[in-house]
Every structure is written in structure tokens, then in C-alpha cells.
Amino acid sequence: TNYQEVNNMKNVISTEKAPKAIGPYSQAIEAAGLLFASGQIPIVPATGEIITGGIEEQTEQVLANIEAILAAKGLSFADVVKTTVFLADMNDFATVNGIYAKAFAEHPPARSCVQVARLPKDVKVEIETIAVCK
């Protein structure tokens, strides 16, 4: 398989209802029946700014951004099979987990959660997702 064949097997997913990519990456890529969404941070799509508030507001904005990307492909949280949650402070885990649990109420996806030294724009939370396309 050469690069051109691989490139033809993937589809770039983009929506104005989620933050624009702030680097050389796509909001999401559809390939092999899966949607691979880039990690979302709490940027308000309309302004391009980080949402004001604490970990609660940041987590809610991250989930809203994920929901918008999923919706661009006609998907929802129910189609997500794996997430990775990156936290600036593991002490925020219980708060993030409570908000996350509302989004993924039924049949939650597999998940990893790690504390990292630093996140883009010094946010408190970033979540990446993998979903099954319909």
C-alpha cells in the first residue's frame, strides 16, 4: 500500500461548530469505519478563546466540542468506543468523571485517564475520542 492509496481511504471531517485546528492536524479523520477525533480542549468555537471558569466549565465545553464533531458525521456519544482523558491535575478526576458520566450515561466507552505535565494553552482538560461510523 502506498501513501496515495492510504490517503484515498481516509476522509477529513470538519465543522465550524467545533474549534478550528490550531496546528497541522484535522478535527477528525474517518478511516476503516472509525472516526478518530483529535483531542478537544475547552475552546469556544465562536470566539476561538478558552472558556472562562474552572474545571466544570472546561469539561462541559470539551464535551460540547466533541459532540459537534461527532454530529458532523451523524454520530453521537453512543457511537464512541474509546476516549483518552488528559488532566493537568488528577485531583480534578472526580469532577471531570461526574460530568463525563452524564455524556456517556449508557454503555460508556473504554477509557484511559492520565495526568500530564502541561496541556495546550494551559487548559485543565483535553479529551480525544474514537467512534464507530454508521
Image (cartoon, rainbow, N blue to C red):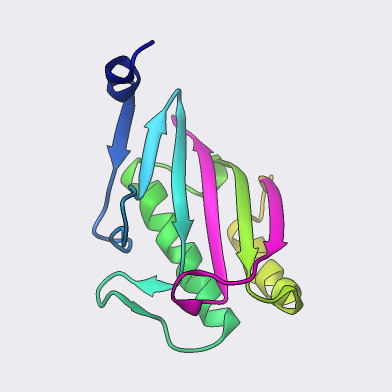
Q: Position of residue 27 (x, y in %)?
A: 35, 50
Q: Residue at x 59, y 81 (%)?
A: 55
Q: Seen in the image, is 85 located left or right of residue 15?
A: right
Q: Nearer the viewer, residue 129 or 75?
A: 129
Q: Which quarter of the rendering shows the N terminus? A: top left
- Magenta highlight on residue 124: yes
Q: Seen in the image, is 112 located left or right of residue 53?
A: right
Where 6 sits versus 21, above or below? Answer: above
- Magenta highlight on residue 79: no
Q: Farthest bottom residue? A: 53
Q: Position of residue 47 (x, y in %)?
A: 25, 78
Where 18 sits versus 128, above or below? Answer: below
Q: Residue at x 28, y 60 (%)?
A: 20
Query: Magenta residues, as a range?
Result: 110-134
Q: Which quarter of the rendering shows the C terminus? A: top left
Q: Position of residue 73 (x, y in %)?
A: 34, 40
Q: Position of residue 118 (x, y in %)?
A: 57, 72
Q: Residue at x 33, y 47 (%)?
A: 26
How many marks are shown on the rendered structure?
0
